[in-house]
DNA sequence: CGAAATCTTGAGTATAATCAAAAACGGTGG
DNA sequence: CCACCGTTTTTGATTATACTCAAGATTTCG
């Protein structure tokens, strides 16, 4: 499963168009027909949809290292929007370059396919989280996911991390109102599950938070598939 | 984008292990490490997760023609379960055969990747549906999806179709209680949006239902991507 | 330092859950 | 063809979780 030296070099050789985007700016919008994908190099982003009533639902958070809209490589019209949460450094890669990379390096193609399958697994998990957990567990769960994913890319130390997500955005991610998110966060603090000040999240008792959020990291598929 | 004669023949040559399964039986379970994928040839199936509290969330419905667990080709451990809703005819395909097919026919690999991306788009849509719509619109929306997908495979005539899904299962799909689903279905009937008797769903006024469900079929990506 | 964004609090309301039981339906076997 | 059993649908009554609205406190950032 590990990529060869040749594969890795091909990735490094990809032409990247680097840009820095301010916080709270759309990167691509529902209905767009992008000709490039966006690699998130620094900062947080979110995928979201807006209903006819104007309510927003965030369907995934993205952190450094993610390629949020890889789907656009094979799906012509975007059915969802992508926007920054914090200021972001992004690198755009033209579809042509990616397609060529996939054609020449099947193992990279498979690895990218796999990444999109993990995205799908996260969407599924969110559906279950929102559909079948009460607010308290729902928020605990989403915090667990963020922490584990940040840890996987080295952005968590001792269960402390910076999460530039407002309560309003957590509300849009959990299908709750921001007022209720505020109250639940206070309850989580009162119960000693989290220490949250500004953007800094600290987890004094990981097992307790995990249990509160009914969290099983399997769906993040962080263990690499072993060679057959 | 269309597959060549050669590609199509290769698909037809796949060794399929055919089976018929009774209604309400698990096909694969969370935690499994399958060595094959399941093609749904007839009947309805559902992907679902169960929380620690024992509550079930259905994350997708599958209809004839779907390959629900294509993800297992690249993700070792299943993070979700798959079960039949009605009696089903399924064909199992070994991963090896699929992997070989992908290696030899890159266009098929891309098409299968695309299918998994559409699955992901559906999961996203469900997240938004459950997170940000009230019960009435939520159920209307899910009915719209089913009808359009059934139509795409020729299982709807004049907005009439057979849907072997119980109210309990709709409840698990929409994140509602079955009692509430029952009441909302009655409201939809009373408003003339649906005629539902037994498993037969009829839609007297498609535009009205679409509007009630805030339904935009873009996310189903039924239009084939045109050749570049 | 000041304006804007974010967070917090309180009060009243609404949507949907729960519990429990009855009615209707569907399939099976006699 | 009918009686019977399990499942599914329906109904009623009560409760709970979470929403809305509105205003005040606090933080952030230019």
Image (cartoon, coloured by chain):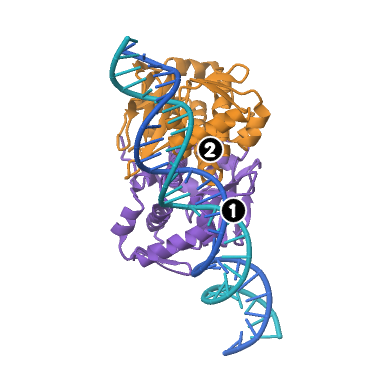
Chain colours: A orange, B purple, C cyan, D blue
| Residue B148 appears left or right of A117 | left
The answer to whether any part of residue B3 appears in the image is no
The answer to whether any part of residue B220 appears in the image is yes
**Residue visible at 57% across and 25% down?**
A147
Determine the CA span between mark 1 and mark 2.
17 Å
Which picture quadrant has residue B95?
A: top right
The vertical placement of A3 against B133, above or below, is above
Q: Are marks 1 and 2 in contact (CB under 8 Å)?
A: no
**Residue visible at 43% across and 21% down?**
A40
Which mark is drawn over residue B131? none
The location of residue B110, given as percent across then percent down, is 44, 37
**Residue visible at 41% across and 21% down?**
A86
**Residue that label 1 marks:** B83
The vertical placement of B104 against D25, above or below, is below
**Residue visible at 57% across and 42% down?**
B97
What is the quadrant of the N terminus of chain A in the image? top right
**Residue that label 2 marks:** A121
Which of the pair D25/A7 is nearer the observer? Answer: D25
The vertical placement of B158 against A99, above or below, is below
Kindly indicate whether the residues beneath marks 1 and 2 are on one polypeptide chain: no
The location of residue B142, given as percent across then percent down, is 42, 53
> The disc numbered 2 marks a residue on which chain?
A
Which of the pair B137/A39 is nearer the observer? Answer: B137
Which picture quadrant has residue B226?
A: top left
Crowd tier of the residue under label 1, counting other residues whose Cα lies within 10 Å: few below 14, some 14–19, many 20 or above: many
Crowd tier of the residue under label 2, counting other residues whose Cα lies within 10 Å: few below 14, some 14–19, many 20 or above: many
Dot 2 falls on a residue whose secondary structure is helix
Dot 1 falls on a residue whose secondary structure is strand
Which of the pair D28/A111 is nearer the observer? Answer: D28
> The disc numbered 1 marks a residue on which chain?
B
What is the quadrant of the C terminus of chain A in the image? top right
The location of residue B9, given as percent across then percent down, is 46, 48
């Amino acid at each position: 499963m590990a990529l060869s030296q040749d594969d890795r070099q091909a990735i490094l050789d990809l032409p990247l168009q680097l840009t820095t985007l301010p916080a709270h700016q759309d990167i691509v919008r529902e209905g767009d027909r992008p000709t490039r994908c966006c690699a998130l190099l620094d900062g947080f982003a979110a995928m979201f949809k807006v209903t006819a009533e104007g309510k927003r639902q965030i369907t995934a958070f993205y952190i450094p290292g993610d390629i949020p809209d890889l789907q656009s490589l094979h799906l012509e019209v975007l059915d969802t929007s992508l926007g920054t949460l914090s200021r972001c450094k992004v690198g755009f890669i033209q579809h042509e370059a990616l397609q060529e990379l996939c054609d020449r390096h099947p193992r990279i193609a498979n690895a990218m396919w796999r990444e999109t399958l993990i995205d799908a697994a996260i969407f599924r998990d969110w559906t279950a989280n929102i559909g079948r957990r009460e607010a308290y567990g729902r928020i605990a769960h989403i915090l667990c996911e963020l922490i584990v994913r940040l840890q996987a890319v080295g952005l968590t130390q001792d269960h402390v991390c910076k999460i530039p997500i407002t309560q309003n955005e957590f509300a849009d991610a959990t299908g709750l109102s921001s007022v209720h998110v505020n109250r639940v966060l206070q309850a989580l603090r009162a119960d000693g599950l989290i220490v949250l000040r500004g953007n800094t999240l600290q987890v004094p008792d990981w097992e307790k938070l995990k249990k509160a959020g009914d969290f099983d990291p399997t769906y993040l598929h962080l263990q690499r598939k072993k060679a057959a």
